[in-house]
Image (cartoon, rainbow, N blue to C red):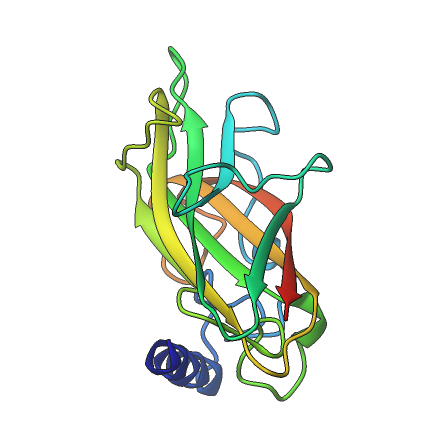
Amino acid sequence: MRNLLTLGTIVAGLLASISCPASPPAVGLASDARSCLACHANTGPWSESPGLIFDMLDKTTMKSLRQPDGAFEITAKRGVPVSVITVLGYEVQEKMLSPHRNGWIFVDTTMIGTNSVSKFAPGWEADVLYGCKIVGDKSPAYPQGAITTAPLTVRPTDLAKDAEISWQVMLTSGEAVKGKPKEGLVSNYFTRTVRLKVTD
């Protein structure tokens, strides 16, 4: 876990050292952008509807960590890693464009603009803070979905406290025009809150 965290901070540092509008790392890492909408349009066909697939599953039980208020909650014992699986996409519907590529980032927005290389919750280690993946994964929970799945492992250190992070997602299709991220790419933006709870 520590090696993964170190690699992640090195990559983030390199991104921050060059002024590139990379997405999703641009959010808080390569720039002080607070959301994906700083670069990308929100004009695609996907919406906050029953067809949206936006879930986080406990890796062991495969049960959703969604709470009644729509946020997700990860509870971890101090020093002990906990792994989850993210599931993102949209239910396939007739005559409707399906997402082709999904991008996501986990970021503590209170850390954006600070000198800290890591923009994740202070005191918490995490291995995959952001990513971009082509749709095509399978999940028994969403058999009709055009989805991506990806793991995330977090570990509260001795300094960790309860925290909230922003989970920002872009569903996209098409190809972005270099230097013009709002052209050529059909996209929609979604966000959820993830609560990190530490127990001793």
Taking the image as shown, residue 9 lies to the left or right of residue 40, namely left
Query: Which corner quadrant holds the C terminus?
Result: bottom right
Looking at the image, residue 98 lies above or below residue 180: above
Q: Quadrant of residue 149?
A: top left
Q: Nearer the viewer, residue 182 or 153?
A: 153
- Residue at 63% from the left image edge and 89% from the top image edge: 115
Q: Is residue 194 above or below residue 129?
A: above
The answer to whether residue 176 of the structure is visible from this angle is no
Q: Would residue 83 be visible to someone looking at this image?
A: yes
Lateral position of residue 42 relative to residue 177, left or right: right
Residue placed at 33% from the left, 27% from the top?
140
Front residue of this view, candidates 29 and 22: 29
Residue at horizontal 42%, vertical 62%?
153
For the point 49% across and 70% down, the residue is 155
Q: Point out residue 49 in the picture as x, y percentages from the top left corner.
A: 60, 23
Q: Position of residue 18 (x, y in %)?
A: 44, 84
In the picture, the quarter occupied by the N terminus is bottom left
